Image: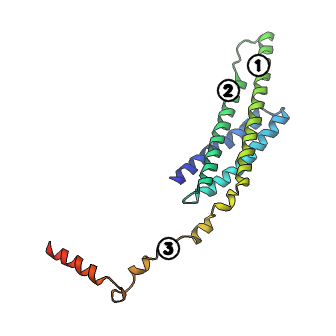
Amino acid sequence: MEGVLVSAATGVMNSVLAKLTAFLGEEYKHAKGVRDDLVFLRSELSTMNIVLQKLADVDQLDELSRDWRDRVRDLAYDIEDCIDLSVHRLRGSAGESGLAAKVARMAKKIGAFRQIASQIQKLKARVVEVSERRNRYTLHGLVPTSSDASSSTKVDVRLCALWTETKHLVGIDGPRDDIISRLMEQ
């Protein structure tokens, strides 16, 4: 179940990274501050995606790892929603072609840019918060790597008894005889 949730988180993350890259290329060529924030978001999300992929290799995640994974996934969904809404706002309809219509569209676009910039600032703050929380609670030291997971696999000590000769087993005569007598009665 953990693997499914982690892969769901990495799936949305890949989608968001692709949308951020496309969004950077088309809409914010001239808006330097917003462009820098988008580059920051893409960089942070890319790193978080790598960590999520490492978490996918871990069989059982501890509570901190699950919480961080869920927060990153929610953040990725929110960023994706912001990008989709921004693209929708900026595209708008061509509508009329007169000067007044062009001025109205331009004013609407400037308002949309300001609103989008504000949302991106909030998302950037959330990304920083999630990243700092991960470092603050030293989550990275608690998550075993794939090499640690294989070396810390516990072996059930009862498995050795499966390969022991019956003459070396102690204390099974009574239960063995009881089972044999019950089987013979039936």
> Which residue in the structure is indicated by mark 2?
88
Q: Is residue 155 visible?
A: yes
**Residue under circle 1?**
108
Residue 153: x and y, percent? Answer: 54, 70
SS type, badge 3: loop
The residue shown at (58%, 60%) is 58
Where residue 6 appears, as percent x and y from the top left, is 58, 51
Name the amino acid, label 3: Val
Viewer-nearest residue: 144 or 18? 144
Q: How far apart are the two marked residues, 1 and 3, measured between alpha carbons?
A: 66 Å
Q: Position of residue 23 (x, y in %)?
A: 73, 35
Q: Nearer the N terminus, badge 2 or badge 1?
A: 2
Residue at image point 42% right, 76% down: 158
Question: Residue 148's image quarter?
Answer: bottom right
Give the distance between the C-alpha atoms of the residues marked 2 and 1, in whole angstroms: 12 Å
In this rendering, does residue 21 appear at all? no
Query: Do the numbered discs 2 and 1 sit on residues whose CB atoms are within 8 Å?
Result: no
* In the rendered image, the vertical position of residue 9 relative to residue 142, given as above or below: above
Amino acid at pointer 2:
His
Amino acid beneath label 1: Lys
Q: Are marks 1 and 3 in contact (CB under 8 Å)?
A: no
Q: Which residue, given by chain and number where applicable, does mark 3 sit on?
A: 155
N-terminal of the pair, mark 1 or mark 3, is 1
